[in-house]
Amino acid sequence: MGSEVVVRQTPVAARDERAEALAALAPSRVKRLAAYANLCAVGLQDGGADLLQGAYLRWLESERAVEGPDSTYRYLRGAIKSARSNALRHDGIVRATFGVRAEPDAEEEIDPVEEAPSGAASAEDAAFAEQLYQALAGDPEVQMLALQISQGASRADIQQEMNWDDHKYEAVQKRKKRTVAKLVREGKI
Amino acid sequence: MMPKDTKYSPLREALLAEVAEELDALDGAELDEFLVEIGEGPDQLVQQGDAALSAALAARGRRRFEDARAQLKTRTPAATTSIITLDVARKRALLEAIRVHGEKTGHMTLAARNRKIESEADLDSFLEACLKLGVIDENGEIKS
């Protein structure tokens, strides 16, 4: 991550330490947070701007000590992720599976959804995997990688099966991330 | 938009986490290139961040204002009532005590010293002001 320190001109002047910490976030970090919020907003009622604003507000009202840009950035990213998880629960999409609403800790980035047992979610995973497989048809290598990962194959298994060395695996994995991000952003998966 | 028949999927969340990792691994021109590739405008994202910051600061300001107003609504009437319900002799004694205390400490303003107390309403008004300023407490005792 970048270590640049840039204080941007904001429409509302920073008045305190917490606001100053946000105003001092490097542009590269702001880009990452905004892009991540936009991706996390797909399928939710709130937009990416809402998720980002909510994360900023949560930081402003937090009593956690201001430690530095790395800590602030991690907190904000965790808050965006938490907002997505909670919105999914709120919409009733996972309520039947997970029951009581649980608040993840933004700073620790621990999301109860990730540690919760699968059940109905596995059925959704199967449907999503099929949808993903079709959406990746334009790049057969990425398609095969996604398929094998969705079936729980390890990296070693995939490399052996596909006869890929480390360099090749990393290259296809990189393409997969970009393609997935694009498909999510376009609302196709 | 996400297809309507697609619900929560751990696989989708895992893929989003991978994309987040990729975002963190990139910087400078590489980051911008990635963002453009997935359909984002790097400059627009910075603007989005600035707008979110402004909106969050405004929202915090509104919340603080609402909290302060709510606190004032719940606290002031009760405190004022307790002062007003003191008998007149006690109020006058308190007024005198405030004057003496003010002169002793030098904290009382000229305006307060010169204020005319001609009626019980004037007295109530003055004591309410002292309560709000923290000169006396809700029980009519002078704060040190």
Image (cartoon, coloured by chain):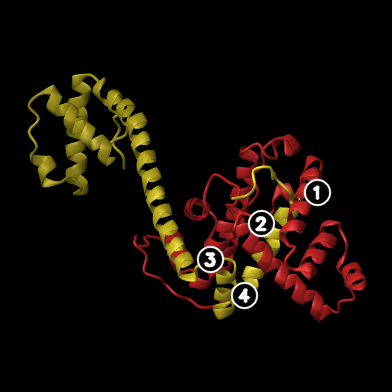
- Label 1 and label 2 in one chain: yes
- Disc on the earlier residue, 3 or 4: 4
Which picture quadrant has residue A140?
bottom right
Whether residues under marks 2 and 3 lie with C-beta atoms below 8 angstroms apart, the answer is no
For label 2, the SS is loop
Tell me which chain the residue with mark 3 is part of: B
Write down the residue under mark 4: B26
Write down the residue under mark 2: A108
- Which quadrant, please, contains the C terminus of chain A? bottom right
Counting every numbered tag in the picture gives 4
Q: Position of residue B106 (x, y in %)?
A: 18, 49
Tell me which chain the residue with mark 1 is part of: A
For label 1, the SS is helix
Tell me the amino acid under the disc marked 2. Glu
Tell me which chain the residue with mark 2 is part of: A
Write down the residue under mark 1: A126
| Residue drawn 67% across the image and 66% down it | A179
Write down the residue under mark 3: B40
Task: Tell me, by letter, which chain the rendering colours yellow.
Answer: B
Whether residues under marks 3 and 1 lie with C-beta atoms below 8 angstroms apart, the answer is no
- Label 2 and label 3 in one chain: no
> What color does chain A have in the rendering?
red
Front in this rendered view, residue B53 or A182: A182
